[in-house]
Image (spheres, grey):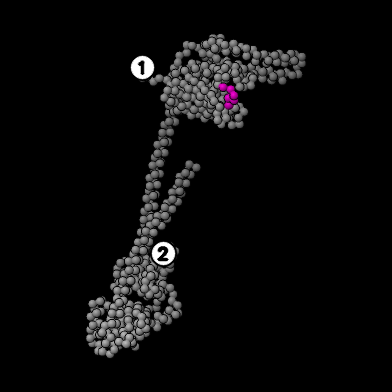
Amino acid sequence: MRSMPYIVGFFGAAVASVGLYLMSYQYFLSEEHSKVQGRLSLYQSSVKAELERFSHLTYVLSKDPFVIGTAEGDGTGTLNRRLEDFAAQAGLDAIYLMDKNGITISASNYRDVGSFVGQNYAFRPYFQNALSGEQGQFYAIGATTGLPGYFIANVVLDDAAAPTGVIAIKIDFSGLQESWRNSGEQVLLANEDGVVLLSSDPDWQYRVLNPLSDQQQERIRQARQFTGHKLDPLDWIELPGNQARISGAKRLHLAATDLPHGWSLHYFASDDRAVARSWLVTALFVLLAGVAFIFLQIQRTRRVGAALARSEQEEAQLRQANERLAIEIDDRKTAERRLKRTQGELERASRLAALGQLSASVTHELGQPIAAMRNHLVAAEIGTSGQASLAQKVGSLVDRMEGITRQLRFFARSENEPFDNVDLCNSVRAALALVDPNIEQAKVEVSLDVPANPVLIRGIALRVEQVITNLLRNAMDATDETSAPEIRIAVTVSEDQATLEIQDNGHGLGEATLAELQEPFVTTRESGRGMGLGLAISASIVKDHDGTMTARNRSGGGTVFCVTFPIASRPEEANE
């Protein structure tokens, strides 16, 4: 059971660590998404720039007089050289002019072995769109060179606005693709059919994001768009939360679909940075938790050591108290013998008067038991059959008489007893020791709250203990009919006085006041259980010690007795 808090703490820390890791991972993952979004926007801008950079050139060339003249039948020599110069200056792969049947009549690469001159490109969608009056735009693998490129075309019109040919340019995107591969990032560009046109990974190029339908395959075949490539599906799958698994690796995935021609740009990034930062935060938390645990253990060890030291000190004080108690017991026995010898000597006139009242009460209280005993003895003389019951009745009457006279032993103090420093805490413990058999017999729960250091007052230790003993006996008598009797004892110290407070959960004071209860022979108990001298004697002793005693009903039921004594003067104060 002692290890249970550590087990619970360990599992609590483990759950907190897992929760912290997941929360920090989501936070850092969102940061990575923001960075990925920024990189995707950059790539998107570069693709759009490449697509739009020369989109106007074919329109301008379609208005060139040399292009129009060559389309109408002029010689190609001059136009070939002009197109060759334009292509070199603009960095284009090729510029070429086709007649309205799709046959190339002039091209910038007219000098090359694989020249476009004489080739028929009427099957290309960009030629067909341009001839119908629209600007043709198409990405495909070159039918002549076998090299991929982006084709843009515009129709060439004569003076009567009739089509005489088509001027087209071919843009090489290999430089853009090479920059992607050199960046070390994972990005791909797919067309409207999901075919990967450009990719930072060579294995992804000319694969499809989703399987092609028969109609799509037939259209691609007729346009000879990707001749020589099977267009196998790409090994990838989209996952929830802007993630995807591609080539067997899980990656962050964002896509831009607002490109021309229905193209889409896909960017993939690793979450390793988010994972590493999350582990770092979790490790820091675990480290701090470990440091806090070690600190708490050190503090706990210090508290245990201090408690052990206090326990040893209290044990030493208890031994001293036991020694003092033995001496005090001997003194008390001597005092009791002296009390019997000096019973008639009372200290004050009030006690002489109380003694007179005591004599009257004893005469009254003992009259009835003695008369009863006399009657039983007369009956015993008449017949012998009641001897057994006679012994029981006489014994109960004797007990009653002893109860009536029990308080008389507290009723004397000699004037020659000097005052000395008395530890109020030790007096409380001594009084508890005296009534301990009664406490155990009545099964009273006692709680004690006293300072660890001595609380010194000026007085006579036996008299102070007499007051505490009387109050404790009164508290036990008050809780006779309580199902769970309880007594609370507390000693507190202020600047100039010490306070003893005794609480019980008994029947309380009722309508009686402390002044009434302090009168000799006034008691709330039934006849035969006391003479009502305890509080009177205690009040007299407290007064002799320059103290005060008060009593009140407890809010939750019961009584609270409060006794105050002046604090003993310090040695340096006494010398002043």
In primary-sequence order, the first of circles 2 and 1 is: 2
Residue 564's disc is none
Closer-to-camera residue (400/26): 26
Quadrant of res 336:
top right
The secondary structure making up most of the magenta span is loop
Q: Quadrant of residue 394?
A: top right
Residue at 48% x, 11% y is: 415
Residue at the image position 34 percent from the left and 85 percent from the top: 121
Give the camera-side residue of 159 and 61: 159
Give the residue at x 45% y 77%. Answer: 213
Q: Which residues are magenta?
A: 508-513
| Disc 2 crowd, CA 10 A, few/some/many (<14, 14-19, 20+) | some
Front residue of 575/338: it is 575
Relative height, residue 340 to residue 275 (above, below) = above
Give the answer, above or below, for where 335 lies relative to 170: above
Q: What amino acid type should be assigned to the residue bearing mark 2?
A: Gln
The answer to whether 253 appears left or right of 179 in the picture is right
Instruction: Give residue 327's position: percent from left, percent from top.
Output: 48, 18
**Image quarter (top left, top right, bottom left or bottom right) of the C terminus:** top left
Q: Residue at 62% x, 22% y: name it.
A: 525
At numbered mark 1, what does the secondary structure look like: helix, strand or loop?
helix
* Name of the residue lying farthest toward the front: 160
Residue 189, image x and y in percent? 36, 71
Q: Is residue 510 on the magenta stretch?
A: yes
Q: Circle 2 — which element?
A: strand
Number of the label disc, if any, that sits on residue 575 = 1
User: How crowded is the residue under tag 1: few (<14 C-alpha within 10 Å), some, or many (20+)?
Assistant: few
Residue 243 is tagged as 2
